[in-house]
Amino acid sequence: MRPLPQITMNDKDEARFLHHYILHVSSLMVPVDAAGNPWKSTYLAIGSRKATAGARALYFATLAQGALHLAHLKGTRNCAGEKAHAVKYIGVAIKELRNSLSSQTDDYTSVLAAVLSLIAVQHVFQNNSHGWREHYRGAIGFVSQYLPDRPWSLSWDSWIVTQSFVLGIIFAETANNSGAVFETPVSPVHNLLTEMMTEPRLGCTVGGNARHLEAIHQIRLLEVQIARSGRTESQDMSPATLEQVYQIIQQLENFQDDQLEAEQSSNEELEFDMPSPTQTLVKLHSQIFDGAVMIHLCRVVLQRPPSAVASYVHQVLTNVGKFMDAGGGEVSAWPVFIAAAEAFTSEDQHLASRYFCQSEMVFAGNRTDMHSVVRQVWADRETLGIEQDCNAGDVGLDWRDVMRRMDIDILLL
């Protein structure tokens, strides 16, 4: 395991916010905190060098994360100083990043790490739900320059940072049903996504695995394909589409038997110390992803109503509660949100609200918007059920339509 880097701070405030980041924020970045947590090792090590503009941008983005989280914990009446420091650090980080991009002399890893950290600061920690698509398009343009050299294959630091980029793209693709999210801009990095999905380690930092991420990406491609074909809900799916759906389901089911063994192998490569309680948490969080992927497939491709996925919704939300009760960290946002949006029984809605309320207390950020959208979906589904004289679980309301109507665009990280 790499030791924590020695970092020289310029003032007491920097030391305070960095200390808070190391002790508290870095642990929130992964569902299961362990020795290989890259936000305690890789990102800190890159930022601590401060030898290049890219590394300095990452360093100040890290300070901003620490300041914003501390501001949240102190409450609205006592956080003015922390918020002011966060704004200052964000400004410095953006300036350093621009210098880095204009000079084109910094290394790939530090610049991409800075870009992704600033995206997290602005669209997760600060809960700014607009603008992240443009920022990801910029990240795609940057990564595209390095496709021939494949730096992510040369070092662990480059791989883990590139993995964060790929995860962001895959989750971001699911947040729009218009058929035009990243299709054109993503095409240059299509081969990168395909390559990363062959790595069992993919998804290790969000509590999932490569099969989950590949399935989510395939579901998005299927959804776009169906939308472009002009198929309506009343029309039967083509045999080719049904075969792809079957393959996704088989891929998930066949993987579940040897899933824990593969994840343990991945975590050994991550230098994770895997005591028995940690193994239990890893398996539990992976099961959360299992159910969420099935919900996503049934809802956006098969167009089944919430009542058809009720067992998966209950399973996911129950496992989320078990994970929290067992001392797990911050549950990844994507699978919980996907399940919560389809909850229609009072029991499942209570389970979902428990997660969001706890997450808002500990983390806040974009979890506040997620909770708002989910509650609006529940309310709209109830209203439509009354109007259509049917059970709320039979109303196939798409949470993305609700989100758009609310003028919210959540980055599901």
Image (spheres, helix red, strand yellow):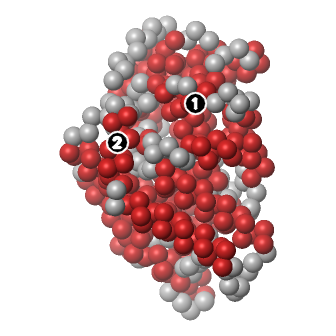
The residue drawn where x is 50% and y is 86% is 391
> Which quadrant of the structure image shows residue 144?
top right
Amino acid carrying label 2: it is Ser
Q: For the residue labelled by badge 1, is the local secondary structure a helix, a strand or a loop?
A: helix
> Which quadrant of the structure image shows residue 177?
bottom right
> Which quadrant of the structure image shows residue 167?
top right
The residue drawn where x is 58% and y is 16% is 56
Near-viewer residue (281 or 23): 281
Residue of label 2:
265
Q: Residue 38: percent from the left, percent from the top?
A: 43, 30
Amino acid carrying label 1: it is Trp
The residue drawn where x is 69% and y is 46% is 190
Classify residue 130 as left or right of residue 375.
Answer: right
Q: Residue furthest left?
A: 276
Structural crowding at the residue carrying mark 2, measured as other residues with C-alpha within 10 Å and reported as few (<14), some (14–19) or many (≥20): some
Q: For the residue labelled by badge 2, is the local secondary structure a helix, a strand or a loop?
A: helix
Classify residue 286 as left or right of residue 101.
Answer: left
Q: Is residue 246 above or below residue 132?
A: below
Classify residue 406 as left or right of residue 38.
Answer: right
Q: Residue 246: percent from the left, percent from the top?
A: 54, 72
Count the marks: how many? 2
Q: Residue furthest bottom?
A: 389
Q: CA distance from mark 1 to mark 2?
A: 20 Å
Q: Is residue 128 visible?
A: no
- Which of the numbered marks, if any, corresponds to residue 152? 1
Near-viewer residue (270 or 82): 270
Q: Residue 211: percent from the left, percent from the top?
A: 48, 55
Q: Residue 385: percent from the left, percent from the top?
A: 56, 84
